[in-house]
Amino acid sequence: MITTHPMIALENISASGNDNGTSFTNLNSSFETGRIHGIWNEADSVNTGFLQLLTGNIPISSGIIRYEGKRLDHADVVYYNRAALPRPHQHSRKLVYLFDNIFDPADLASMVRLYKIIHPLKQMGRTILITSTDYNALKAPTDFFHIFSKGAFQARLHARQYHLLDDVFRHLQRS
């Protein structure tokens, strides 16, 4: 894989084993480092399972996850859910930050907390992945939007392309 940007790369990942039975087969995708990535799926359990792959909590049966060309060291990854939001810079030495459905789009204070946490991390060059089932709320804080559906990443849009999201979702519903 040739790239001009450092990235996290998932290469032919297959895994199963989280509590809800979510499994992944030949999963491929990449995420530029130092950016904020939104990952949408219609089910919270799939979002959680995907992030658990990156933390090492779900063992990978085949494939590899790389960070800047080397095997991802799970010690460089930190995971948060709504119940365990960090203080800003609590783990600022980690390279990858995973936020699992941490904000309530109806709660403006939760969005403000999120910005106070993630934007300083981005300025430090950290990679941030945020999952949500609410795609409108997910657009606001992210540089890239990834749609994970039907067991694969179906689309990846840069923030400049977010105006196309409704069309992409309509196309995916028809296919």
Image (cartoon, rainbow, N blue to C red):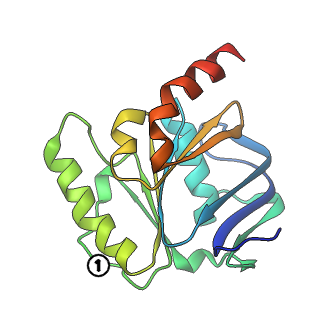
Front one among 9 and 43? 9
Query: Which percent across, then down, holds residue 62?
Result: 85, 59
Q: Amino acid at mark 1?
A: His
Query: Which percent across, then down, holds residue 96?
Result: 51, 71
Residue that sits furthest to the left in the current view: 109
Which image quarter holds the N terminus? bottom right
Front one among 59 and 29? 29
- In the drawing, does residue 64 fall left or right of residue 172? right
Query: Which percent across, then down, holds residue 117?
Result: 27, 66
Residue at the location (62% across, 39% down)? Answer: 148
- Quick check: can you spot residue 134? no
- In the drawing, does residue 23 fall left or right of residue 61? left
Residue that sits furthest to the top in the current view: 174
Where, by quadrant of the figure, is residue 169 drawn? top right
Q: Secondary structure at mark 1?
A: loop
Which image quarter holds the C terminus? top right
- In the image, residue 43 sits, relative to residue 125, either above or below, namely above
The local crowd at label 1, few if under 14, some if 14 to 19, many if 20 or more residues have their Cα within 10 Å, is few
Where, by quadrant of the figure, is residue 93 drawn? bottom left
Residue beneath disc 1 = 89
Residue at the location (63% across, 65% down)? Answer: 56
- In the drawing, does residue 123 fall left or right of residue 146? left
Query: Which percent across, then down, holds residue 9?
Result: 71, 65
- Quick check: can you spot residue 46? yes
- In the image, residue 115 sits, relative to residue 50, either above or below, namely below
- In the image, residue 50 sits, relative to residue 67, either above or below, namely above
